[in-house]
Image (spheres, rainbow, N blue to C red):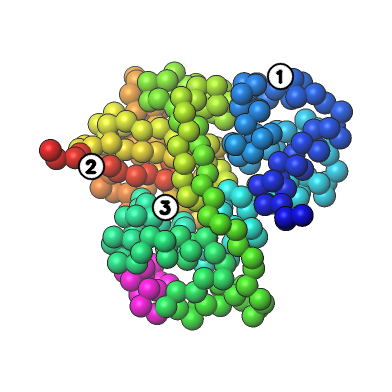
């Protein structure tokens, strides 16, 4: 019999946890406040839950600690695209790309490294870049990526055999409309808000576990004076190592993007030393700029 994929193992364990907990699917739906369709997609493997959502399921079903940890680990591996935990280099490269607001394709164009190769360098713990690739990435990302350190990181720093890595797996995030997001209140659970106001799903190759939803609109809608569209991946919280970048709702209405300058300085319209009262702030974990297409 063929070996189950990691996603199949996760779904089977999730269903088993539901049965062992003595709860019905309907009871779990009512507790989480999600739609029957969303729950069906999670239990069929069509939609990966966020880490925060899985934590809520575990809290409700009270599985054994080792079973809960197993599910949490599998979800993290699935959301990163790897069968096992990623190396320190994989995480550093991923965070550096996100903090420079670059998609895989944009980094490929800037570094002259094929996108397929970059996906392997970012998502496989056994992929080691050449010295030329390390130099090109260092120049684009503005961080030091010494080839020797990368090689040690990629091997886990111990000379261990390379870990088995699954095929790249996209992460599907709920898409919410900017107009609907304007009705969000900080008193609400953002995860539930995103799922209940989902108008579809967008796929991303790799995202941190804290990613919850994606919203896109003309850049000016977010208070950014750029032509074209901004695509923002919003999170439940900011992962360690990510620069501060927030989508804010001004108390008087309207959105603006706020950060701590640095790589994001060019994106900021609001601020400039002026204090702005906000209704809420949501961490932006990835920001993509889609320029206007000239006809």
Instruction: Return the x and y of residue 274 as percentages of the image width and height.
Output: 29, 35
* Magenta-drawn segment: 131-145
What residue is disc 2 on?
A: 291
Q: Which residue sits at x=59%, y=36%?
A: 47
Left or right of residue 177, residue 36 in this image: right
Q: Tell me, yes or no, whether the highlighted magenta stretch contains residue 135.
A: yes
Instruction: Return the x and y of residue 9 as percentages of the image width and height.
Output: 72, 48
Instruction: Return the x and y of residue 199 as percentages of the image width and height.
Output: 46, 24
Q: Secondary structure at mark 2?
A: loop
Please say if the residues under marks 3 and 2 sit with CB atoms less than 8 Å apart. no
Instruction: Return the x and y of residue 128 as percentages of the image width and height.
Output: 49, 74
Left or right of residue 258, residue 85 in this image: right
Q: Upstream in the sequence, badge 1 or badge 2? A: 1
Q: Tell me, yes or no, whether the highlighted magenta stretch contains residue 120.
A: no
Spatial CA distance of label 3 from label 2 is: 18 Å
Measured along the vertical axis of the image, is residue 167 above or below residue 20?
A: below
Q: Which residue sits at x=61%, y=23%?
A: 37
Measured along the vertical axis of the image, is residue 100 above or below residue 171?
A: below
Mark carried by residue 30: 1
Q: Residues within 10 Å of mark 2 (few under 14, many from 20)?
A: few
Circle 3 or circle 2, nearest the eye: 2
Q: Could you tell me which quadrant the C terminus lies in?
A: top left
Residue closest to the eye, 166 or 51: 166
Residue closest to the eye, 271 or 32: 32
Mark carried by residue 98: 3
Measured along the vertical axis of the image, is residue 138 above or below residue 284?
A: below
Q: Secondary structure at mark 1?
A: helix
């Amino acid at each position: 019999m063929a070996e189950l994929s990691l996603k199949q193992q996760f779904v089977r364990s999730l269903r088993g946890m539901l049965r062992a907990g003595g709860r019905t699917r309907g009871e779990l739906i009512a507790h989480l406040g999600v739609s029957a369709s969303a729950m069906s997609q999670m239990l069929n493997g069509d939609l990966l839950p966020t880490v925060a959502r899985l934590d809520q399921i575990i809290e409700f079903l009270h599985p054994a600690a080792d079973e809960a940890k197993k599910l949490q680990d599998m979800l993290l591996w699935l959301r990163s695209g790897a069968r096992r935990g990623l190396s320190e280099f994989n995480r550093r490269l991923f965070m550096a790309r996100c903090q420079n607001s670059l998609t895989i394709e944009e980094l490929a164009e800037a570094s002259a490294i094929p996108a397929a190769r970059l996906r392997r360098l970012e998502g496989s713990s056994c992929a080691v870049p050449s010295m030329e690739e390390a130099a090109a990435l260092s120049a684009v990302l503005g961080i030091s990526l010494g080839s020797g350190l990368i090689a040690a990181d990629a091997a886990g720093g111990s000379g261990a055999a390379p870990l088995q890595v699954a095929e790249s797996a996209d992460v599907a995030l709920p898409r919410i409309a900017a107009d609907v997001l304007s009705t969000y209140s900080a008193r609400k659970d953002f995860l539930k808000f995103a799922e209940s106001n989902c108008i579809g799903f967008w796929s991303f190759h790799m995202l941190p576990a804290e990613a919850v939803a994606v919203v896109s609109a003309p850049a000016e809608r977010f208070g950014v004076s750029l032509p074209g569209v901004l695509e923002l991946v919003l999170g439940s919280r900011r992962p360690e190592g990510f620069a501060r970048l927030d989508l804010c709702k001004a108390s008087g209405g309207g959105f603006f993007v706020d950060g701590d300058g640095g790589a994001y300085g060019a994106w900021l319209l609001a601020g400039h030393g002026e204090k702005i009262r906000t209704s809420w702030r949501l961490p932006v974990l990835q920001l993509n700029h889609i320029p206007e297409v000239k006809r």
